[in-house]
Amino acid sequence: MNNKKIVASLKDVSKVYKTGDTTIIALDNTTVDIYSHELTLIMGPSGSGKTTLLSILGSVVYPSSGEVLINNENISAYSENKLAAIRLQKIGFVFQQFNLLQPLTALENVLQPLILSKMDRVNASKLAKSTLEKVNIADKMHTLPRKLSGGQKQRVAIARALVTDPPILLCDEPTASLDSKSASFVMEELRLLANEGKAVVVVTHDLRLRKYADRIMYVEEGKLSDNLKNEEDYK
Ligand code: ADP
Ligand code: MG
């Protein structure tokens, strides 16, 4: 077998938002382990807590209670600076709206994390190009995002997430802005990365993506479970 190991865990994690006199439990006492070599799909209807869960796993949002472990390191009490370093080394993010910097070419977008990591220009450029090749979009390296299709933009975004070779890739509705053909290309790309050893976590409300997953969980009203309770909620 391929040496699956736990790369991230949440232990009894809750996230509570208080706005005025309303309290929202966005994530309710959640415990989960995320493994390398797996594409983990976390399904849930809109508002169920998917982005909250992913943001806590990605150390972008602090939990209200509970612990977050990344590569066996308990990061729950880390400072903002230390978390930024963890994010840069360990985690790649992919978003529904791609979040590419519009004035920069595909290549320049992929270079950004390497510039932040202070890699020298020559090596950074080589690495960014080979990463664009890996996701089959190197022919567009000098193109601006607005001249790319949705599927092409998402490939550039995946290259940007991958270029620092993080063990964990967190994808928030990565196919929600794509036509079904581009969506399958993107999911197949993510599938390959999981086969190569990355821990790929995809959150989505699209039940059709289940065929790409090694493991499927459902989040409903902030609660994570192994079972789909009500398929109607996903329509
Ligand atoms: P999903 O990604 O599944 O649509 P979210 O994780 O974005 O769900 O949101 C879960 C719940 O938490 C929703 O009720 C949402 O309105 C609430 N929520 C999320 N972020 C915030 C925030 N920053 N402030 C207040 N409420 C929030
Ligand atoms: Mg969301």
Image: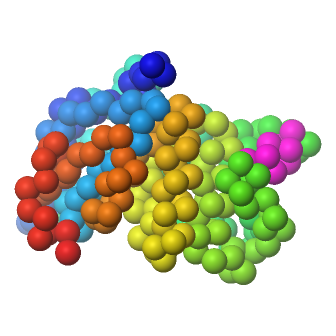
Magenta-span inclusion, residue 125: yes
- Residue nearest the viewer, comparing 118 with 219: 219
The residue sitting at 21% across, 65% down in the picture is 45
Mainly helix, strand or loop, the magenta region?
A: helix
The residue sitting at 74% across, 54% down in the picture is 132
Magenta-span inclusion, residue 208: no
Colour setting: rainbow
The tally of labels here is 0
- Residue nearest the viewer, comparing 116 with 34: 34
Residue 231's image quarter? bottom left
Per the rendered image, the range of residues in magenta is 123-131
Horizontal arrangement in the rendering, residue 150 relative to residue 159 (left or right): left
Residue 234's image quarter? bottom left
- In the displayed structure, 13 sits above or below 105; it is above
Quadrant where the image shows the C terminus? bottom left
The image shows residue 171 at horizontal and vertical percentages of 45, 53
- In the displayed structure, 95 sits above or below 198; it is below
Horizontal arrangement in the rendering, residue 127 relative to residue 211 (left or right): right
Horizontal arrangement in the rendering, residue 142 relative to residue 16 (left or right): right
The image shows residue 69 at horizontal and vertical percentages of 36, 27
The residue sitting at 60% across, 49% down in the picture is 161
The residue sitting at 58% across, 74% down in the picture is 150
Quadrant where the image shows the N terminus? top left
- Residue nearest the viewer, comparing 48 with 150: 150
- Residue nearest the viewer, comparing 26 with 223: 223
